[in-house]
Amino acid sequence: MTNAATQIELLPPPIRTRRPVAQSPLRDLKIGNVPVGFPVVQAALSGYSDGPMRLVARSLGASYALAEVMIDRFVLSLKNRERTRYHLHLDDEDHPVGGQLMGSDPLQFGPAARKLVEAGFDVIDINFGCPVKSAVGGCRGGYHLSQPAVALEIVSHVREAVASHIPVTLKMRRGMDDSSASRDNFFEILEGAFARGVAAITVHGRTVEQKYIGPSNWDFLRAVKQHAGTKTILGSGDLFTPQACLEMLADTGVDGVTVARGAIGNPWIFQQCRELAAGQPPSFPDIAEQRRVLAMHLDLCVAMGEAKSTVATMRTFGIKFARLHPRHEDVRNAFARVKTVEEWAAVLAGWYTHGIEPRQEQP
């Protein structure tokens, strides 16, 4: 429902110094009264984290997932027949799952939140973090970090609109920019949201102004968690490897981490995090495993979507999965050319076969 899908994955991750991960038991994550478990979860990804992507991630170790962000007024206008098209259909295995709302009018958030609860979402997440031009220019997403009073009005409307057992959470960036006023606004919203009954807040270590450029400020995440004390804080930003996920947990003290771009085309990151946390070397998917998961993803898309949208979706995902293939450029180009489900399946049959040795490390 936004154009963010074309903007979030194009920039390479910043380089971080690789350090040994301290082996210590990880605390299970809980969001309000919803038990999540393993504290590495699937973030909301506009244009990506639909039902099929979430189910694939769950099959590979994601304990919780967020649906792609939905504009409040669009949610309110949906008819029953459009529930699948706009990702309001939830599979029985897709729990616990959060529905994320974004919008500009505080009065529309409450009714939209009730719609998501009626659709079966276990958690309602409010997006105060999207940095793309269309969102900020439309007074949505990260724009609300510049107006704490309006942001907290939105929080109040959502919290009052849904039953007390439904957790309400926030997604924030560390501010509009690096000014002291922006920092003050951030903490006013953080404290006010918890005071209004928010169960957890996810903090991205970049500013809205940064978008996806430059490193995520993990020092800020550490400061936020220390400030919040026992309240639940999740961290986000620069989580492209299992090593980075466990490092963020250890270095900042956050209660959980949300994997966003790092999960596009590599749903195995959740399984790898579990392996690393258990003291085992993270496993890399061989060609047979890549084919199995790609086929699973295709089957889920065919079952849940229309033929035209399925081809577009799987072309995008195939291009991302191709990064793990030893002939990644050839495979990427092959996926980019497909126009039918049959052509996509032919690429899978031709390039993911016995005798092709997998890459030995993450791209």
Image: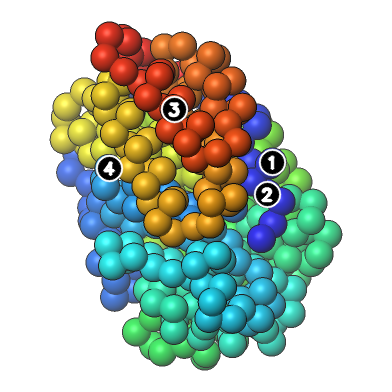
* Helix, strand or loop for disc 4: loop
Q: Compare marks 4 and 2 and give the one earlier in the sequence.
A: 2
* Nearer to us in this view, 310 or 268: 310
**Residue at image point 44% right, 78% down:** 119
Closer to the camera, 215 or 89?
89
* Residue lying at 55% horizontally and 43% vertically, measured from the top left: 311
For disc 3, the marked residue is 346
* Outermost residue toward the right in this view: 137
Q: Which amino acid does the dot numbered 1 rest on?
A: Gln
Q: Earlier in the sequence, mark 3 or mark 4?
A: 4
Q: Quadrant of residue 93?
A: bottom left
Total tally of numbered discs in the picture? 4
Q: Are marks 3 and 4 in contact (CB under 8 Å)?
A: no
Quadrant in which residue 296 is drawn: top left
Q: Could you tell me if residue 97 is visible in this image?
A: yes
User: Mark 2 and 1 residues: CB-CB less than 8 Å, in contact?
Assistant: yes
Pointer 2 or 3: first along the chain: 2
Q: CA distance from mark 2 to mark 3?
A: 30 Å
**Alpha carbon separation for disc pair 3 and 4:** 25 Å
| Residue carrying label 1 | 7
Looking at the picture, which amino acid does disc 3 mark? Ala
Amino acid at circle 2: Ala
Residue neighbourhood size for the residue with mark 2, other residues' Cα within 10 Å, grouped as few (<14), some (14–19), many (≥20) = some
Residue at 46% over, 11% down: 327
Q: Which residue is mark 4?
A: 60
Residue hosting label 2 = 4
Q: Label 4 vs label 1: CA separation?
A: 26 Å
Residue 206 seen in the figure: no
